[in-house]
Image (spheres, grey):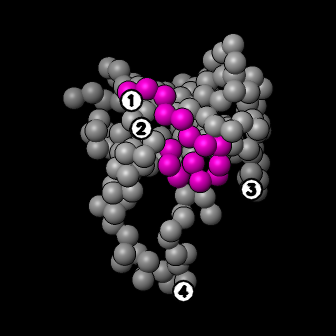
């Protein structure tokens, strides 16, 4: 499963895997991702258009929002889910070799952007209770305060913004 590479899937009641996971280990993975790929707050981070890149993007978003910006875990969790959906769309639907990830924080808002070379617009589809796929933009629409697509001369940027309580 994308994003779970290097982790065993739980068997039985899952107690063995739960005892090995810790936020510290996850932070180490996130720090390593930033060392390898770059800081999405300093410029666009290029990532290969592979399913595994969703895990990289999630780790980058997690470490920036939770550790660097010091924002709440619930906001971090929602942003991690939403970036995973945008990356999944970029990987599945654009045919690109790579895409870019960028993050911004300004007073009262965070913004996460995924840029790809396709000019095809994503579609917000109606979702039924039993649907097993096609929920990505529905989740973005439900959890983000704002989202959209900026067409570029060569591609597009799909983005979402979330309100934050600045200290």
Q: Work out whether residue 38 or residue 120 is closer to the camera in this orientation and state it.
A: 38
Which quarter shows the C terminus?
top left
Crowd class of label 2 (few under 14; some 14 to 19; many from 20; radius 10 Å) = some
- Image position, residue 151 (x, y; %): 68, 16
In the orientation shown, which residue stands out farthest toward the top? 153
Q: Are marks 4 and 2 in contact (CB under 8 Å)?
A: no
Secondary structure of the residue carrying tag 3 is loop
42 vs 129: above or below: above
Spatial separation of the CA atoms under disc 4 and disc 3: 24 Å
The answer to which of marks 3 and 2 sits earlier in the sequence is: 2
The answer to which of marks 1 and 4 sits earlier in the sequence is: 4
Which quarter shows the N terminus?
bottom right
Tell me the tag on residue 12.
4
Dot 1 corresponds to which residue?
41
Spatial separation of the CA atoms under disc 3 and disc 1: 33 Å
Please say whether residue 54 is one of the residues in the magenta stretch.
yes
Spatial separation of the CA atoms under disc 1 and disc 4: 41 Å
> Which of the two discs, 1 and 2, sits closer to the camera?
2
Dot 2 corresponds to which residue?
38
Q: Residue at x 76, y 38 (%)?
A: 95
Please say whether residue 154 is one of the residues in the magenta stretch.
no
Crowd class of label 4 (few under 14; some 14 to 19; many from 20; radius 10 Å) = few
Residue 137, by quadrant, is top right
Dot 3 corresponds to which residue?
132
> Which of the two discs, 3 and 2, sits closer to the camera?
2
């Amino acid at each position: 499963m994308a994003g779970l590479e290097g982790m065993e899937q739980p068997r039985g009641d899952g107690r063995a895997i739960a005892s090995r996971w810790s936020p510290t280990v996850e932070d180490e993975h996130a720090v390593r991702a930033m060392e390898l790929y770059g800081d999405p707050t300093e410029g666009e981070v290029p990532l290969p258009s592979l399913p595994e890149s969703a895990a990289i993007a999630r780790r980058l978003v997690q470490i920036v929002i939770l550790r660097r910006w010091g924002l709440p875990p619930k906001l971090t969790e929602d942003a991690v889910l939403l970036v995973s959906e945008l990356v999944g769309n970029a990987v599945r639907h654009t045919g690109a070799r790579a895409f870019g990830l960028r993050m911004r924080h300004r007073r009262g808002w965070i913004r996460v952007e995924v840029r790809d070379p396709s000019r095809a617009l994503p579609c917000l589809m109606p979702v039924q209770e039993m649907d097993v796929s096609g929920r990505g933009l529905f989740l973005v629409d439900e959890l983000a305060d704002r989202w959209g697509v900026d067409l570029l001369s060569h591609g597009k940027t799909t983005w979402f913004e979330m309100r934050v309580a600045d200290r």
